[in-house]
Image (spheres, rainbow, N blue to C red):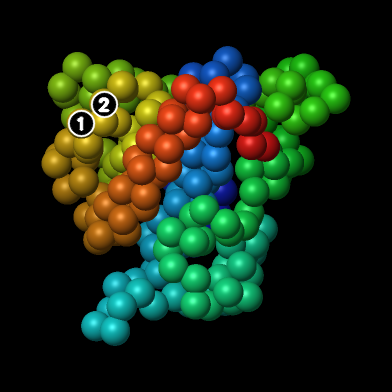
Amino acid sequence: MSEVAAGNSVATGLLGLALRQFDGRLSRGPVLAHGLRAGLLIDLALAGRITLGPAGTEMDTTPTGWALADELLGDIDRHPTRSMSDLLQRGRPHLGTAIHELCSTGRWVTQRRALTATGSTYREADTTRSTVLAERLAHLAHGRTGRGDEREAATIALAVAAGLGTGRRARGLPEEVMAECGAVAWLVQDVTHFIVAAAAQDRAADFGGNAQFYI
């Protein structure tokens, strides 16, 4: 069982990509908050905390020591009958919790503080990882998938589902990216399908003038 930690996580990789795309702010609508929780679920699966057994999904909710992941595990403990889509849509942690943790640990730096979180802008203290991920997204937009490990592939899959960087969301994920997700491909497929549907709803709400910032 591997460690569950923020440094190389799917969840923080996704937020770093979003930060790059939206010039230091985070995106409109609930999709990125869903993506945060989806990323944490994948991180837990990569660490062996979530597995697909004969009776369905099995979860080890023992605290990991990473506050963001443990908040999600606590939510699962409090609501053991919730479906995966319920966890993604109505669960914890919220995006604001993630921003606070990233800033308090020095991974993100506040560039401009506003009266509301939606008005603040941030930058990554170390952009090395998000630069690599952004380059791979750019390659994907031109039909080149490249190679990566399970964690990187899962991050790319979530980014595509959330519409970050490629414009390919409506056409689905390339099979090569899903194949690289390896043992967690089953979970990546489930959560990305949910996020694609949520993004479609969010675009419809935006078209109707009802979109909001969720931070």
- Is the residue marked by circle 2 packed among few (<14), some (14-19), or many (20+) residues within 10 Å? some
The quarter of the displayed image where residue 176 is located: top left
Is residue 126 visible in the rendered image? The answer is: no
Q: Amino acid at mark 2?
A: Arg
- Identified by mark 1, the residue type is Arg
Quarter in which the N terminus is drawn: bottom left
Q: Is 177 situated above or below 40?
A: above
- Most extreme residue toward the front is 208
Checking the image for residue 168, the label placed there is 2
The quadrant of the picture occupied by the C terminus is top right
Task: Give the residue drawn at x 63%, y 70%.
Answer: 74
Q: Report the side of 160 relative to 39 (left or right).
A: left
Count of marks overlaid on the render: 2
- Front residue of 98/129: it is 98
Point 58% across, 59% down: residue = 91
Residue position for label 1: 171
Q: Do the numbered discs 1 and 2 sit on residues whose CB atoms are within 8 Å?
A: yes
